[in-house]
Image (tube, helix red, strand yellow):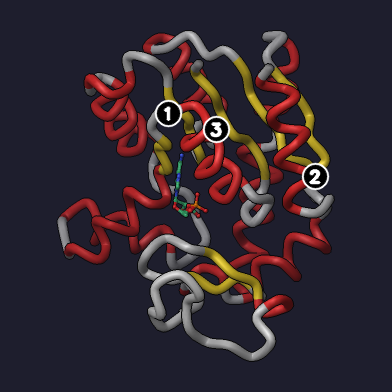
């Protein structure tokens, strides 16, 4: 199955895509994760991406499209994949259409106020686990691996506001785009994590 997770930053795309990946046994492709790995590794792509990500702006379409095109050609994508954070513009969606037949687009719906709260409270571990300060009871290490938790630079409040503006201007038009294609399924992402996941599984059945 070829799935896209659509939604504002902090709507739960990464969290749920990780779970669906385990459920379906297909790769989870997060363009944001690819950029963060490159930033950590100090690659030329990382340096370029960082200059946009730190401002809350989008990395240029042609750069992202090339990365996704290459990734989707790999053997592990033959049986399907989950795209998380791509496409983010109509231009990217048009490019994707030429290289893959998407089965379903899951749109995680969460209002802006909740997004700002969620993202500002988000804490990450290097192992990939994600937490929220609201449920950490003051803990600052990962319950899974003991690693020190940290806040993504682009999760700071001022950057989140720019990311949300960019989302509404550039990415939200994809909701109508995929609705017209008959692929869009809305899921209420403001519910508790288990309820959201149950709704996603219903959509995928
Ligand atoms: P994410 O982890 O999906 O929130 O992505 C983090 C940042 O990476 C975004 O705010 C963008 O700057 C950049 N990024 C990720 N995916 C894309 C994309 N499809 N197009 C442009 N920029 C992207």
Q: Is mark 3 within 8 Å of ligand 1?
A: yes
Q: Nearer the viewer, mark 1 or mark 3?
A: 1
User: Which quadrant of the figure contains the C terminus?
Assistant: top right
Q: Position of residue 179 (x, y in %)?
A: 74, 17
Instruction: Say which of 140 and 5 sits in front.
Output: 140
| Label 2 CB sits under 8 Å from any ligand 1 atom | no
In what element is the residue under mark 3? loop
> Dots 1 and 2: beta carbons under 8 Å?
no
* Residue pictured at 55% horizontal, 42% vertical: 19
Residue tagged by mark 1? 25
For residue 137, above or below residue 9: below
Residue 17 shown left or right of residue 59 in the figure: right
Helix, strand or loop under label 2: helix
Q: How far apart in space, not on screen, are marks 2 and 3 (Cα)?
A: 29 Å
**Residue 58: % across, % down:** 47, 49
Residue placed under numbered mark 2 in the picture: 195
- For label 3, the residue is 89
Horizontal and vertical percent position of residue 107: 71, 33
Contact? badges 2 and 3 (CB < 8 Å): no
CA separation, marks 1 and 2? 21 Å
Q: Is residue 43 above or below residue 77?
A: below
The disc, 1 or 3, on the residue closer to the chain's N-terminal end is 1
Q: Residue at x 74, y 48 (%)?
A: 194
First-in-chain label (2 vs 3): 3
Residue in the picture at 70% in, 40% down: 197
Real-space CA distance between mark 1 and mark 3, rounded to the nearest whole angstrom: 27 Å
Residue 64 place in picture, x, y as percent: 35, 37
């Amino acid at each position: 199955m070829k799935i896209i997770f659509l939604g504002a930053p902090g709507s739960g795309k990464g969290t749920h895509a990780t779970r669906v990946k385990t459920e379906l046994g297909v790769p989870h492709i997060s363009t944001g994760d690819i950029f963060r790995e490159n930033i950590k590794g100090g690659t030329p792509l990382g340096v370029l991406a960082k200059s946009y990500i730190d401002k809350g702006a989008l990395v240029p379409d042609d750069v992202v499209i090339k990365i996704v095109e290459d990734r989707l050609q790999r053997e592990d994508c033959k049986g399907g994949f989950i795209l998380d954070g791509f496409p983010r513009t109509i231009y990217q969606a048009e490019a994707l259409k030429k290289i893959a037949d998407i089965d379903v687009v899951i749109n995680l719906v969460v209002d802006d106020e909740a997004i700002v709260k969620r993202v500002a409270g988000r804490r990450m571990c290097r192992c990939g686990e994600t937490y929220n300060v609201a449920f950490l009871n003051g803990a600052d290490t990962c319950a899974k691996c003991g690693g020190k938790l940290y806040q993504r630079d682009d999760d700071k409040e001022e950057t989140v506001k720019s990311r949300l503006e960019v989302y509404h201007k550039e990415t939200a038009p994809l909701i109508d785009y995929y609705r017209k294609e008959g692929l869009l399924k809305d899921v209420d992402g403001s519910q508790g994590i288990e309820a959201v996941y149950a709704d996603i599984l219903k959509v995928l059945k």
